[in-house]
Image (cartoon, rainbow, N blue to C red):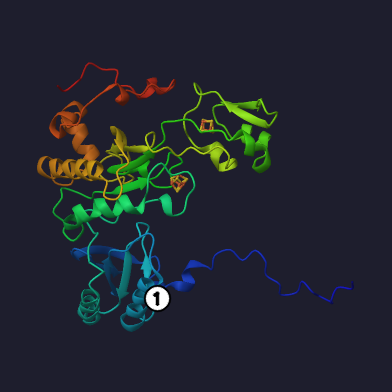
Amino acid sequence: MDLPENYMQDRITDVGPPKYDDFWPEVIKKNYGQWKSHRILEPGVLVHVSETGDKVYTVRVAGTRIMSVLHIEDICKIADEYCGGFVRFTTRNNIEFMVDDKAKLEPLKKALEAKGNMPRGGTGAGITNIVHTQGWIHCHTPAIDASGIVKAVMDELFDYFTSMKLPAHLRISLACCLNMCGAVHCSDISILGIHRKPPAVEHSNLNNVCEIPTTIASCPTAAIRPYKDEAGNKSVQVNVERCMFCGNCYTMCPAMPLADGEGDGIALWVGGKVSNAKSAPKFSKLMVPFLPNEPPRWPSTVNTIKHVVEVYARDARPFERIGEWAERIGWERFFEKTGIEFGHHHIDDYRLAMTTWRTTPQFKF
Ligand code: SF4
Ligand code: SF4
């Protein structure tokens, strides 16, 4: 077949995402690199001031990670009517509407209030939206659900979203397995789904649906080796002693399912942060090694988180994040004040953990 002449001309293949500044409102474009300061006027309302004297007022409202099309349509209608067609989503899935004139602020706030499902908040010393992963709705390796737990937790803590009465910012995140698509390693409170049992192996199916060498290579601890069952099926075998229940093999091979009603559950972590303010960024530390998976409202998890938030709110000094508070009073006191049991699971036994251990006699009992 003859190819048409210049058939590749003007053909764009690897387009990638459109350039971000195509989506900026005019006032943001005009003041690029010239923003001087910003203030929070009230929970959920910010003002940014530019060197040029321009101001941008932002109204932040709660969003969700998984949204219905109808909800997105509502958001777009408000953006069209009040914000010149511009709207943005924050990294924690909040929605921000921006206007360049104070006179436009009140009508925007009223329109959002009238919707009833777009509460203002998520700024400053409060709890903003919980960032989370896919959970049962989408991913194949979750030990727990994501949006279900987030809804149950946030229903209890909602008052902290619309106010700024905590000592400092409090960031909560959830990842539904150790692969951790959520920011659980560096949030003030982290909810982490964990598996506690090795994958089952469906010998009769495995060779039909999986590539055995790739499956073996997928295991980070070299726990998988080739195997032939009694019926002569080519398959693999798991060395349970070496398995750390990461689920990598299941990603490669659907004949190695990992989910287990009893084995799967929640670990809670505490004290992480990304911010450089006051103290260096911190990794989260283990708080509760295991809580059962309790759909549809996960009461043990919700109550534990609520309790820790309340103790922190009472006890910490202004501007102290949870990790900073725990370090000031001592982690021994943290467990004492929160009443959370300290056990052998809290001691890091990773073979290279020595550098992270406290090696002074300065314990604070
Ligand atoms: Fe999937 Fe794990 Fe990511 Fe959850 S954290 S979405 S289970 S890979
Ligand atoms: Fe290896 Fe992880 Fe599969 Fe266990 S769960 S066998 S550690 S890949």
Indicate the position of residue 187 as horizontal and vertical percent values: 31, 44
- Position of 346 relative to 215 (above/below): above
Residue 178 occupies quadrant: top left
- Which part of the image, by quadrant, shows the C terminus? top left
Residue at screen point 32% across, 23% down: 347
Residue at screen point 23% across, 25% down: 342
Seen in the image, is 283 located left or right of residue 12?
Answer: left
**Identity of the residue furthest to the left in this view:** 314
Name the residue beneath numbered marker 1.
25
Residue 221 occupies quadrant: top right
- Position of 37 relative to 225 (above/below): below
For this rendering, which residue is in front, 241 or 257? 257
Seen in the image, is 115 located left or right of residue 237?
Answer: left
Residue at screen point 50% across, 24% down: 240
For this rendering, which residue is in front, 282 or 294? 294
**Identity of the residue furthest to the right in this view:** 1
Indicate the position of residue 163 as horizontal and vertical percent values: 16, 59
For this rendering, which residue is in front, 335 or 317? 335
Identified by mark 1, the residue type is Pro
Q: Secondary structure at mark 1?
A: loop
Q: Classify 10 Å Cα crowding around label 1: few (below 14), some (14-19), many (20 and above).
A: some
Indicate the position of residue 256 as horizontal and vertical percent values: 55, 37
Seen in the image, is 18 located left or right of residue 358?
Answer: right
- Which part of the image, by quadrant, shows the N terminus? bottom right
For this rendering, which residue is in front, 32 or 73? 73
